[in-house]
């Protein structure tokens, strides 16, 4: 039984290495996700974001972002966020650029979400164990704060992918505005 587990783990590791080394500049890495892999409490994250948007925010000493309309949760943006969080975790990277060179816009488009604008916030590590702590980190960082407070964004999704054995959390927020229906 132990030998079978070792063989399975070796095959899994080999497939991950092959996938991460196979780079196609025109395609998004096919990171298979399962909604149950997203460990975020969407209700808490949505409330944190919308409560802040309702109050406005001093994002840095020179930039006050006034109150703006609340965002709606979008499951495609949530899936794009989960794809990126998982990609960062599996490939041990921390970047807005995916392991295949993709941007958040590429990941959103791969899910058939047509947008006019988008933004992304990421965070990683054991120092952000909860939605409240990662949100505090983002809202006190000028660029992340501006993404949260950008008036033109109307929808967002967020994800948390956890590697339990490393006590590492990979967080992603994806913001967008859908194209008007034709």
Image (cartoon, rainbow, N blue to C red):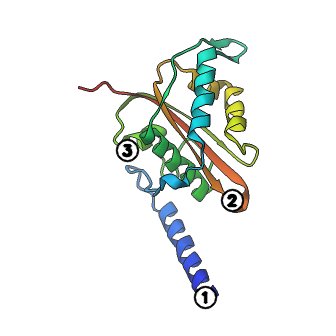
Residue 148 location (% of width, % of height): 58, 26
Nearer-N-terminus badge (1/2): 1
**On the picture, is 35 further left or further right than 139?**
left
Residue at mark 3: 111
Residue 5, image x, y percentages: 59, 81
Mark 1 crowd level (few <14, some 14–19, many ≥20, 10 Å Cα): few
**In this figure, which residue is indicated by the disc labeled 2?**
164
Residue hosting label 1? 1
Q: Which quadrant holds residue 10?
A: bottom right
- Closest to the observer, 111 or 100: 111
Q: Position of residue 2 (x, y in %)?
A: 64, 86
Whether the residues at callouts 1 and 2 have beta carbons within 8 Å, the answer is no
Label 1: which secondary element: loop
Indicate which disc residue 156 carries: none
Of discs 1 and 3, which sits in the foreground? 1
Tag 1 and tag 3, C-beta contact below 8 Å: no
Residue 146 in sight from this viewpoint: no
Q: Is residue 20 left or right of residue 108?
A: right
Given this view, does label 3 or label 2 mark the residue nearer the observer?
2
Distance from Cα at disc 3 to Cα at disc 2: 28 Å
The first of marks 1 and 3 along the sequence is 1
- Identify which residue is drawn at 50% across, 70% down: 15
Residue shown at the point (76%, 44%) measured from the top left: 127
Task: Work out whether residue 147 can be spotted.
Answer: yes
- Position of the C terminus, as image quadrant, is top left
Q: In whole angstroms, how far apart are the C-alphas of marks 1 and 3?
A: 39 Å
Residue 150 position (above or below residue 102):
above
Real-space Cα separation, disc 1 to disc 2, in angstroms: 24 Å
């Amino acid at each position: 039984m132990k030998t079978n587990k070792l063989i399975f783990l070796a095959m899994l590791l080999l497939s991950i290495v092959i996938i991460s080394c196979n780079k196609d500049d025109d395609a998004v890495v096919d990171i298979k996700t399962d909604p149950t892999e997203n460990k975020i409490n969407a209700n808490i994250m949505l409330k944190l974001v919308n409560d802040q948007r309702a109050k406005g925010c001093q994002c840095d000493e020179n930039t006050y972002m006034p109150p703006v309309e609340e965002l709606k949760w979008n499951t495609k943006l949530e899936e794009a966020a989960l794809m990126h969080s998982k990609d960062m975790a599996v490939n041990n990277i921390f970047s807005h650029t995916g392991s295949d060179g993709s941007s958040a816009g590429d990941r959103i488009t791969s899910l058939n979400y047509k947008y006019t604008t988008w933004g992304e916030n990421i965070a990683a590590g054991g120092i952000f164990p909860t939605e409240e702590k990662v949100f505090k980190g983002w809202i006190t960082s000028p660029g992340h704060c501006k993404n949260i407070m950008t008036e033109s964004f109307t929808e967002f999704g967020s994800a948390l992918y956890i590697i339990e054995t490393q006590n590492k959390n990979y967080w992603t927020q994806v913001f967008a505005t859908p194209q008007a229906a034709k």
